[in-house]
Amino acid sequence: MTTRRLVLTRSAAVMGAASTGLLLPEIVRAQSGRIRVGFMLPYTGTYATLGVAIENGVRMGIDEKGGKLGGRDIDWFKIDDESEPSKGVENAQRLVQRDKVDVLIGTVHSGVQMGIHRVVREAGVLSLIPNAGVHEATRALCAPNVFRTSFTNSQPTLALGKPMFDKGVRRAVWITHKYAAGDQAFEGFRDSFTKAGGTVVKELGLPFPQVEFQALLTEIASLKPDAVACFFAGAAAVKFIRDYAAAGLKDKIPLWGSGFLTEGLLDAAGPAAEGIMTTLHYSDSLDTPRNKQFRTAFATKFKLQPDVYAVQGYDTGLLLAQGMAAVKGDSGNKQALYKALETQTIDSPRGKWSMSKAHNPIQDIYLRIAEKGENKVIGIAAKALADSGAGCKMG
Ligand code: BEZ
C-alpha cells in the first residue's frame, strides 16, 4: 500500500477516533510519512536547459537543508511538459490525480503555467512556480496555495526603460516571441520607456517556438531605431543573438533585453553577445559571499555553471524546506503551511527576498552588460521591486 493511501486511511480512522484519545499518535504517524513532490518542467525543446537548471537548483536547496521536508523523506515525480501549452492541463492532472503529489513544482513557460494553475486551484494542491512569469498567477487569479519564487513577466522590464533612455535611446523597436511572457514583458518595457520620455516605434514578434528571424531583422534595419529591446530565452535567445550579429546589426543598433536574453548561454552565443545590456533579478557576477558560495557549490555538484533558472530552483527548494520545517512536516495543516511560506525570508544568491501579499518575490533588479562570457553588474536598476499584484484577492 502506498504511503499516501496509508495516510488517507488513517485520517479516516482519526475522524472516527477523535473522541477516544487516539488522535495524537495517528496524526504524528501521518506527518512522518513520505511526501510526494512533482516536477513539471521542460526537459526537451527550446527551454530544456532551463528545466534542468531548475530541477538541479531545487534538489540542491533541499539537500542543503538536510534532504528532507519537515523531517519527511521525499518521493519525486517528473513530467516533461515540452513547453507545450496544449498539454498543460493534462500533464498537471497526471501529477495531481495519478501521482497524487503533495507539491507541484513547475514550470518555465507562461502558457503551460496557465494549465497548471487551473488544475492546482481546483485541487488545492501546493503549487510552487520556479520560473513562468505569467501575471495572472499572482494577480487576478492569485490563490492561497500558489507561490512564485521567480518574477512576474513585467518585473525585469519595468526596470529596463529608464537605463535605455538615460543612455540616449529615444526611438526603440520591441521584438519578442508572441505569447504571454513576451507580451507582458512588453508592458513593463513600454510603461518604463515611455514614462522616461522614449517612443516605441514598432512592436515585432513571431510565434513561440519559431526562430526564423530574418524578415524581422530586415525590418529592424530599415526602421533604423536607436536601439532594439526584446524578450527571448533559452535556445531561441542564442539564435536571436547570433542572427542579430550576422545580419550586421550588432554594431549599428544596440541590443537590450529582459535579462533572460543572456542567461545560461553566453558561451553558446560567443562574441555576438558582447555588449548586450539587460535587466534581471540576478547576475552571475554579483560580488557577494553568498553568490560565490552558491556558484562554487552548484558547479562542483552538477559540473554546470548556474544561471538565473538554477537560482530560482534553488530558492524554491529553500522556500519549501523552510516552510515545511516551520510546520514540522505537517503539510496537511494548509493554513499554517501557507502562512509559513508567506513569511519566509529567502537568503538567495540574488540577494535576500521576501514574498509580496500576492505571493511573488519583492526583489532588486540589476542592470547588466554581457562582457567576456559574464553578465557583469553595472548597478541596481530597481530596488526592492514588487509586482503590482493588481486584482489579487486571496481567500
Ligand atoms: C515564461 O514563459 O514565462 C518565461 C520563459 C522563459 C524565461 C522567462 C519567462
Image: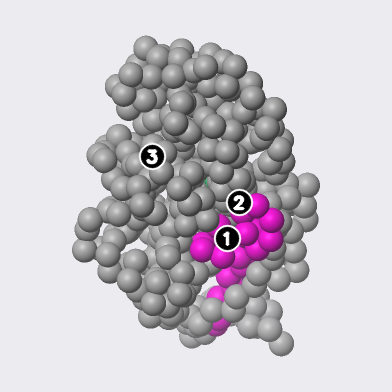
Precedes in sequence: disc 3 or disc 2: 2
Q: Which residue is more in the foreground, 45 or 113?
A: 45
- Residue 241 to residue 164: above or below: below
Quick check: marks 2 and 1 in contact, CB under 8 Å?
yes
Q: Nearer the viewer, residue 27 or 147?
A: 147
For marks 2 and 1, the one nearer the N-term is 1
Q: Position of residue 213 (x, y in %)?
A: 66, 35
Magenta part of the chain: 33-54
Which of the two marks, 3 or 1, is nearer to us in this view? 3
Q: Please name the residue shown 52% across and 30% down the image.
A: 249
Q: Label 2 sits on what residue type?
A: Ala
Numbered circle sitting on residue 275: 3
Q: Is residue 232 visible?
A: no
52 displayed left or right of 206 = left
Residue 108: give x, y in percent of width and height: 58, 52
Question: To which quarter of the image does residue 297 belong?
Answer: bottom left
CB at mark 3 closer than 8 A to ligand 1?
no
Query: Reading the chain from its start, which is encountered first: label 3 or label 1?
Result: 1
Q: What amino acid is labelled 3 in the image?
A: Gly
Answer whether residue 42 is magenta in the image. Answer: yes
For residue 35, above or below residue 257: below
Query: Would you identify the image quadrant in which residue 377 lies?
Result: top left
In the image, residue 25 sits, relative to residue 84, either above or below, namely below
Viewport quadrant of the N terminus: bottom right
Q: Is residue 54 left or right of residue 165?
A: right
Instruction: Specify the label residue 235 is tagged with.
Output: 2
Could you say which disc has been placed on residue 49 in the image? 1
Amino acid at pointer 1: Thr
Asked whether, in this view, residue 197 is left or right of residue 99, the answer is left
At x 40%, y 14%, the residue is 170
Q: Residue at x 78, y 47 (%)?
A: 86
